[in-house]
Amino acid sequence: MLKADQTIQINFTGGIVPAGQLMKIVELAADHQCRELRFGHRQQLMLDIPVNNYEAFMTQCHLAHIPLAAGPNIVSSYLTTGLLMHTGWLTEGVYKEIFDQFDYHPALKVNICEQSQTFVPLFTGHINWVSSAHSHYWYLYLRLPGTQELMAWPMLVYSNHIAALSKAVEQYIHQAHSLEGIYEYVTKGKVISSREKEQELSLPPFHLPYYEGFNQQNNGYWLGIYKRNEYFSVPFLKDMCAICQQTMTGAVYITPWKSLVIQHINKWHRQLWDYILGKHGINVRHAANELNWCVEDDCEDGLVLKRHIIRYFDSMDTRTYGLCFSVRVRKAESLFGSIVIRRQQHIRESKLKYMQRYDILHTAGFNANSSQLVLYREAVSKEHLGPYVAALCKAYYEQKSENDLLGDYIREQQAAVIPAAVKTIYQCSECQTVYDEAYGDPDQGVQAGTLFNELPAEYCCSVCDAPVTNYAQVLKPA
């Protein structure tokens, strides 16, 4: 059977899409009978054009100067600089300067990310740049195609050399199968601005921010839009781009979670966004346990598994905060996930759905950026995936609870309490008159500093004449 549609990918470096350019693409897609568009986990745009219209569409893209994908997109955490807390040196301007250096289309996957954020994966590329604490210096981690092992570059590299070094690595990575070999090939006879590492990269604890709906941003809002089936209709995208253009919003951002983000929405324009969300029936408040999934692009089987497990999570009220999930049904692709559901690949693999089996794995320490996978269960049927994955979520929280965090906090607080200073006085039990050793009782010839047990036996209260034996010891704040 002949394929009715041809899938086309369009890359937007770093996941940044000018609203005007996106409008042009959407209009061209509509003119060539494309009704829906979608976005991939490498922040790229994908659309299906009927085969009969493919050549005409390609011609129109060329005339409109729309660059079609010649390789994988460059992934970046650019959008997090305005979306999340950001205090480092890596600004939007620095990102753009680095993007402008790429005068070629990478054939390998390149990631460029800020080290403290956990919204964009650090290591799903083959060439992974991660910012360091030193201004304009970067860690570099390489992953050979077809493997999951990361190799750390021995030096920090200056921003101005990111594109050139990425290009050189790409040229030699297939010739040298070790980091030492690649390093020797790439640096031989070249001057690369670098500095010694003072310490290795420390992975941040994973936390996925809730990236959907309206959220405060300065005096306005940012808006996250997620679609359960991953498809965005052409009419909705046209309205979205029209608002961006009319309100001078500027750009649309594609996330690795296949969603869209619009930033810097003026509070007076929120009603326009509410209008088109209602007009097109867009829900922007999905449960958090649905948003933390990374599924292969164009993979309906993966989406079916995701929905199946989420239904079980909902029925058991399973907590998933601090975790994210990766579904791999086609190949051992490097996807982002602290828990991985991977379909087994066998030579004699049955095409019958009920015969398919899955392995459940998790990353070392459940950190989604880790490349080390630990097998939890193997050869699990689809019907048992929900209970096993939920049990693994529970194991994650049990592991986190091994250290008595609450008890340690209470003990720290108690240790930090400084006892209030007190002093001892003596008080007449008849009239409450006080004898203070610091002052004595000059009227009865008792000098200041005379201790109570040094008072003469005939001493009596200066007010009611009660004997000294009627005095009681009392503590009071100093």
Image: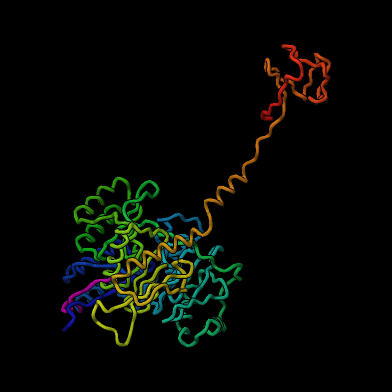
Q: Which of 134 and 24 is in front in this view?
A: 134
Specify the segment rendered in magenta. 43-54
Residue 249 painted magenta: no
Image height of 79 relative to 354, above or below? above
Q: In which quarter of the image is residue 256?
A: bottom left
Residue 35 appears in the picture as rendered = yes
Instruction: Farthest residue to the top: give it.
Output: 464
Q: Give the number of marks.
A: 0
Kindly identify the residue that appears in the image at 24 percent across and 61 percent down.
Answer: 237
Residue 52 painted magenta: yes
Q: In this view, does 225 lie to the left or right of 75?
A: left
The image position of residue 227, as x and y in percent, is 27, 62
Instruction: Farthest residue to the front: give it.
Output: 469
Kindly identify the residue that appears in the image at 72 percent across and 23 percent down.
Answer: 426
Image height of 195 relative to 145, above or below? above
Residue 250 appears in the picture as rendered = no
The image position of residue 205, as x and y in percent, is 48, 61
The image position of residue 431, as x and y in percent, is 68, 15
Q: In this view, does 82 lie to the left or right of 261?
A: right
Quarter of the image for the C terminus: give it.
top right
Image height of 126 relative to 231, above or below? below
